[in-house]
Amino acid sequence: MAHAAPPAWALLAYLASGVLFILALRGLSSPATSRAGNRFGIIGMALAIVTTLVTHIPAALYSGVGVEVDNGLITPFESFAFVPDYVAIFEVLAAIAIGGTIGWVIARRIKMTDMPQLVAAFHSLVGMAAVLVGWAAYLNPEAFGITGAAGLIEPQSRVEMGLGIAIGAITFSGSVIAFLKLAGKMSGAPILLPARHVINLGTLAGILILVGYFTQDQSIAVIALITALAFAIGFLLIIPIGGADMPVVVSMLNSYSGWAAAAMGFTLHNTAMIITGALVGSSGAILSYIMCKAMNRSFISVIAGGFGADASVGSGEAREQRPYKQGSADDAAFMLEQAEKVIIIPGYGMAVAQAQHALREMADKLKEKGVEVKYAIHPVAGRMPGHMNVLLAEANVPYDEVFELEDINSEFSQADVAFIIGANDVVNPAAKTDKTSPIYGMPVFDVGAAKQIFFIKRSMGGVGYAGVDNDVFYLDQTMMLLSDAKKMVEEIVKALD
């Protein structure tokens, strides 16, 4: 059965929603325009949902009494004769209300420090939605208008369906593992299986072969096997990836969710889903590339194992005891207020301690004393792309004080103080000097060029997610402030009064 073409006004509405989604992505590229970007996204999604409901609901919700249905849609001149199916109407509205309420409650209650695992959880829902839609289309192809001769599903629709289900299943299971790692419910260390590369490549090849075979044989066994293998490979792809590569994983899963939505858009003949999925998929892929470039790593190397894949890294072996200088909040406060320029480098430790508000208060007091304060953000700091930017924005840190690595790295030589709070790998000089280090080649901040370094961390026993020691701890100009990040910054703020 040929699928009904949407009316002209619906195509224009979908085009408008696509433009709004593009404006949303453009707005989200900067903290200063992110609120406007979010508004554009909300308006675009509302427009797409309303358009889809208006153009697709009638034939599904109404059992006609003398009603002529043309290609699945009630004709305008006959619509007066329908009898509403109130149960179906209630089900659709109830589903929208329940989903909207859950999303609203989560958005209101979620802590900014929990945003990475929330994003991973939402990605998993997008993936599962793609799987369920694909199976619904398979089980009831007539309703989706994808049947051809002899009532069989059209070959191109089978390809779209198979790929959509496969990508969605990979997104779901991979996102679940990412969520568990980010939430600390399973170890963030790589879990390495024997012959994992052979298993992964073999499974992916098997999925592609089955999708091709699905065009010839649409039996339920084929699509069930595609689904099962895709769920398995999503799990297998993510468990070997260590915590240091999680920003890439989050952006990669974001891309997968977009491609899954786009594939289902073709199955549903929904222009908005195709546009939205393509935008999310391509932007996620570009972001993954940017993240990998920031770590000087290839995308394949991240997927193949991640930081810490070498069993010798982070194995807990005793590290060489080296002398270091430990200071107090009073020492730091005295030297900070004497400085002319201070550069703050936040990391995941700041997020865990929820120290961003105290940090902004410290910066405000320093600025009152005539000190120039800037924030340096590494592209892979935290557990998701933009994690530190989001936390600083929540604390109302001015956007013009926040700089990316390439824009501020040259300024450390003019800085009186480099203030490191909860960061580690992104300031580790081993990335430039030690070819045996797992982070070798990753661009890092040149904090060693600053006159004075304050380094806040809980203890000297911990190392970053890459599992390697940091020579910055032992530099002559480094003073270690061993404490909870929030507690230490609050003590510095009191000492500045």
Image (cartoon, rainbow, N blue to C red):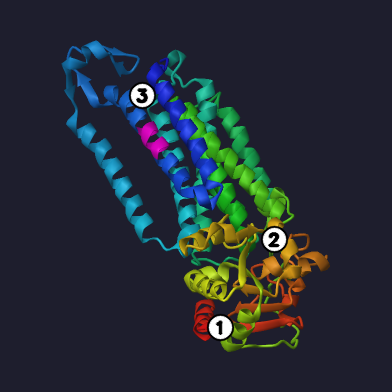
Q: Position of residue 16 (x, y in %)?
A: 44, 28
For the point 53% across and 79% down, the residue is 489
- Identify the image quadrant of residue 312: bottom right
Secondary structure found at label 2 = helix
For the point 61% across and 68% down, the residue is 373
Residue 112 within the magenta-colored segment of the rendering:
no
Asked if the residue at tag 2 contacts the one at tag 1, i.e. Cβ–Cβ closer than 8 Å, the answer is no
Does residue 77 appear anywhere in the picture? yes
Task: Tell me the mark number nearer the camera, choosing from 1 and 2.
Answer: 2
Task: Tell me the mark number nearer the camera, choosing from 2 and 3.
Answer: 2
Q: Is residue 484 above or below residue 37?
A: below
Q: Residues within 10 Å of mark 3 (few under 14, many from 20)?
A: some
Of the numbered discs 3 and 1, the one sitting upstream in the chain is: 3
Q: CA distance from mark 2 to mark 3?
A: 57 Å
Asked if the residue at tag 1 contacts the one at tag 3, i.e. Cβ–Cβ closer than 8 Å, the answer is no
Disc 1: which residue:
483
Magenta region, residue range = 43-49
Q: CA distance from mark 1 to mark 2?
A: 27 Å
Disc 3: which residue:
143
Q: Residues within 10 Å of mark 1 (few under 14, many from 20)?
A: some
175 or 271: nearer the viewer: 271
Labels in figure, total: 3
Secondary structure found at label 1 = loop
Disc 2: which residue:
408
